[in-house]
């Protein structure tokens, strides 16, 4: 699977406020909590990007359908236009 971000970018510390009990339990399950969080964050970003892309594609299809309808039948406003 192709990475959705630059995996060779430098790492930097960030401040997060997390439930300390949850962090303690997670630390008992992995020796590299940062890598686990980075993986989960990458999955979240990919999922959200897919949702946005699907929404944008839906909007493009809707605009194309509306344009085709308008080209075939004219605008609803045409029957009320005084021009």
Image (cartoon, helix red, strand yellow):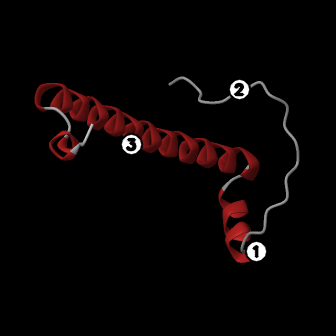
User: Which circle's residue, 2 or 1, is located before the other in the chain?
Assistant: 2
Q: Is residue 81 above or below residue 9?
A: below
- Residue 31 appearing in the image: no
Reading the image, the residue beneath label 1 is 20
Q: Residue at x 21, y 32 (%)?
A: 65
CB atoms of marks 2 and 1 within 8 Å: no
Q: Under tag 3, what secondary structure? A: helix
Query: Extreme right residue here?
Result: 13
Counting the numbered discs, the total is 3
Residue 69, horizontal then vertical, whole percent = 16, 32
Residue 81: mark in rendering? none
Closer mark to the observer between disc 3 and disc 1: 3
Name the residue carrying label 3: 55
Q: Residue at x 24, y 42 (%)?
A: 82
The image position of residue 72, as x and y in percent, is 12, 26
Of labels 3 and 2, earlier in sequence is: 2
Image: 34 above or below 54 = below
Circle 2 Cα neighbour tier, 10 Å, few/some/many (<14 / 14–19 / ≥20): few
Q: Position of residue 41 (x, y in %)?
A: 63, 47
Residue holding disc 2:
6
Q: Position of residue 17 (x, y in %)?
A: 78, 68
The Cα atoms of the two marked residues, 3 and 2, are separated by 25 Å
Which secondary structure, mark 1? helix
Tell me how far mark 2 sits from mark 1, CA to CA: 30 Å
Secondary element type, mark 2: loop
Q: Answer above or below: position of 40 versus 74.
A: below
């Amino acid at each position: 699977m192709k990475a959705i971000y630059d995996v060779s970018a430098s790492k930097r510390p960030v401040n997060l406020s997390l439930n300390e009990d949850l962090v303690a339990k997670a630390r008992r399950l992995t020796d590299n909590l940062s890598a686990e969080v980075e993986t989960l964050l990458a999955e979240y970003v990919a999922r959200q990007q897919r949702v946005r892309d699907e929404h944008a594609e839906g909007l493009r299809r809707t605009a194309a359908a509306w344009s085709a309808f308008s080209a075939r039948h004219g605008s609803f406003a045409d029957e009320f236009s005084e021009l």
